[in-house]
Amino acid sequence: MADEEPDFSSLPLVDRAVHKQWKVRKEAYEAAVKEFESSPDESAACFTPWMMDPGLWTKAATDSNVAAQQEGIAALCAFLKYGGASACSRTRSHVISGLVEKGLPSTRAATKASATEALLLLVELDTPAPVIEQLLPFLAHKLPKLIAATLVALTSIYSAFGARTVDPKPVLKQLPKLFGHSDKNVRAESTKLTIELYKWLKDAMKPMFFNDLKPAQQKELEEAFEKVKGESPKAERLLRSQQAVVAAAEAAGETIEPEVEEEPEEVDAFDLAEPVDINAKLPENFLEQVASTKWKDRKDALDGLYAEANVPRIKEGHYDDIIRALGKCMKDANVAVATVAANCIEAMANGLRKGFMKHKSTVLGPALDRLKEKKQGVIDALGKALDAIFNSTSLTDCLEDIIENTKHKNPNVKLETMRFLIRCLRTTRDVPSKPEQKLIADNSARLLTDTSAPMRDCAAEAMGTLMKIIGERAMNPHMEGLDEIRKTKIKEFFETAQVKAKEKPKPVAPPPAPKAPPRKLGSKPGLKKKAPAAAPPAEEYAPPKPAGRGLAAPGSKMAPKGGLGGSRLKKGPPSPKRALPREYEEEEPAPAAPPNRLGVGKGLAGRPLSKEPSVAAAPVRVDPQIAIDKAELEELRAERERWEKEKREGHLERAKLMQEINDLQLQNAQLIEDHTRDNLAIRSKEAQLVRARADADSAQEEVSKQKREIERLKRELQRAVRPSSPAPTDISDHIMHMNGFNHRESSMSRNSNRMSFASTNQGDEKENGRAGALSPGLRSESGRASSASGDHESWKRAAEVTSQLKLRIEQMKAKQGLSGRGTPQY
């Protein structure tokens, strides 16, 4: 063995790392750690073979020998620590699976710690999302120990970097399933992870999973949350990108606090939740149910909508029809329907947030008008709906409707609208504009004289809340004309009001730097006219008479500058060529500031010599650039106010147009409904007309068939009678005439055994034994004697033919379904 060791050491490091003997592999990993630690930078040659073959680290993390595995994962940590972002990106997808399956569940504490450190380095060097994405599948592993080990690693990651750096949403989705696991270790580690996330997210994380837990688990978590509720966690580690920001700030001499923490109050469940598509979950006949004539059907449909819409976040989509239906339900005569509709509006507004702004005009007006309801349950539901609408819009968007409803004839509508206005002023983060301030103050002042005491209190509270936002000084113009009692009431509300928006003081322009070069603003009108104002300093500095010997007269060009004359009185008069240019250079920009500080009227010679340098560089001199900047600032402010005014007017115009659009849409929907109803009526009439025409055609065809059959029977009867007897030429007409008579005689029509042409007057004649005897009417018409013996045979044959014809007629009628109508007897 001692002879083989030199051979192992002579092998390349990469070959030794995959050697079949574990000791050789262990030594290779140890040697790799030393090389990485002694490398000068991330581009050293020692990292290259390991980056070219990332599978080496897969084998190191899953080494069959526990001692070699421990050193292999330690080498991986050194490789990541000194190799930088390139080492992370090359090896991340190859090592995470092995670290979770073999490293985290290891019985060796050092191996487990190294595996966790490797995962933390993978997060630190790049971004956390890929690491979390590869860890999540192990939460559904069939081995409970792997799930528990993965939860421990996730807890370490969130504890080290914080829930603001590492996105908590993917993990929050898995918590209900983890809390329902059969293994107690999995449930225990899930509880630890949940508590760690609660430190960062507070109650905003509850809507994501809390309602899916068992009551016992909810109670246990609530107790654990109470213990850590007051903690403000801080990130233990920073990403490399965050470290670079801190290092750059320190190099520049600045001290900044990296924003790696998230304030608990700023965490919103809306940001954590996944958007839900409401349209996909509603039944197809939802709009029909909402428009049903039965209030129970309408309420059931709205209950179903509330169950689907009561989620932290709703996916933006086409909800115009649903919102219009909710706006109509606000006017529903049934109180239960209106209450559920208000709950649905609240859920939709909270779920859509800014996406609900376009639906504001559809529901805000009906909701405010429904405040006339006296039941407190309805008022509470409407108040929550109005607050949700305001949170999705702004004070500017809602103010017009609010002011309009404070003039409502119903006192309850006015009172609840003022309470809604007070809530808006408390929660808004934007300071109302000057016109909005005046509108609110004037409207509230008008209501201070209302006959209702609650209304007067609300008006005073609204003015006090507005004063808290804009300040007492800005509120003074709106307080003029009020008596002391009302002013005292307003100030009481002002002292107790809690607001989120406050008027910021206007920034004061700092004095310009002494040696800063003047800024060129171009040829703006009115800005260059202030420069000549710096010429009069010579007259202001001039004393009433010469201050000393050798000094030039006041106003003369020979006058020296500042205190220079005093220093030259002992040496003689100064040179005018040297004093003149310097005086005009330095004194021309300053209009009149230096004389006030230097003592005008004492004379130029009265200045001490020691003040000479400070006078020359006096910082109190007013730079004309300040005046230029102030003029430009005033112009910008005026332009800003003009733009804000145009913006407000645009908002109002947009609101009016949206209202007109909604009205037109409602009219269009009504016209479409009427048109559809008319079309259905027309189609029904057309169907009736088609059926009537078909019945008429079938009846006409039946009549034609009957006529043809009658003609045929007439011809057969004539052929049967003509050759043997001088029978009447038109006996069929007589038969038809008799049929009309016999049809009215029901007793004769039911007698199917009589086969003669008997008269309708039964009982007048008896049977005389002659078959087929003719009636008296027939005899009178024919004018022939029925007793002629020569005609006996002929009439006998005629009677037989007639019987056959009658039988055939009745068979034909029975075949055509006419037997039930009563057949005429011949």
Image (spheres, rainbow, N blue to C red):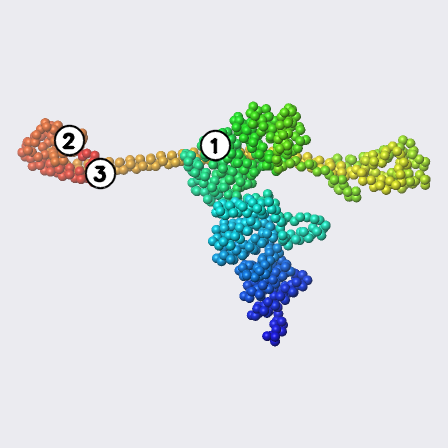
Q: Residue at x 64, y 34 (%)?
A: 469
Q: Residue at x 12, y 28 (%)?
A: 761
Q: Nearer the viewer, residue 685 or 714?
A: 685
**Foreground tag (2 vs 3):** 2
Which image quarter holds the C terminus? Answer: top left
Q: CA distance from mark 1 to mark 3?
A: 60 Å
Q: At label 3, which amino acid type do we have?
A: Gly
697 relative to 510 in the view: left or right: left
- Helix, strand or loop at label 3? It is loop
Quadrant of the image occupied by residue 156: bottom right
Q: Give the number of the disc on residue 817.
A: 3
Q: Residue at x 89, y 40 (%)?
A: 609
Q: CA distance from mark 2 to mark 3?
A: 21 Å
Q: At label 1, which amino acid type do we have?
A: Lys
Q: CA distance from mark 2 to mark 1?
A: 71 Å
Q: Nearer the viewer, residue 550 or 377?
A: 377
Q: Report the label total.
A: 3
Q: Which residue is mark 2?
A: 747
Mark 2 or mark 1, earlier in chain: 1
Q: Give the number of the disc on residue 737.
A: none
Q: Which residue is mark 1?
A: 331
Q: Residue at x 83, y 34 (%)?
A: 596
Q: At label 2, which amino acid type do we have?
A: Ser
Q: Position of residue 135 (x, y in %)?
A: 54, 55
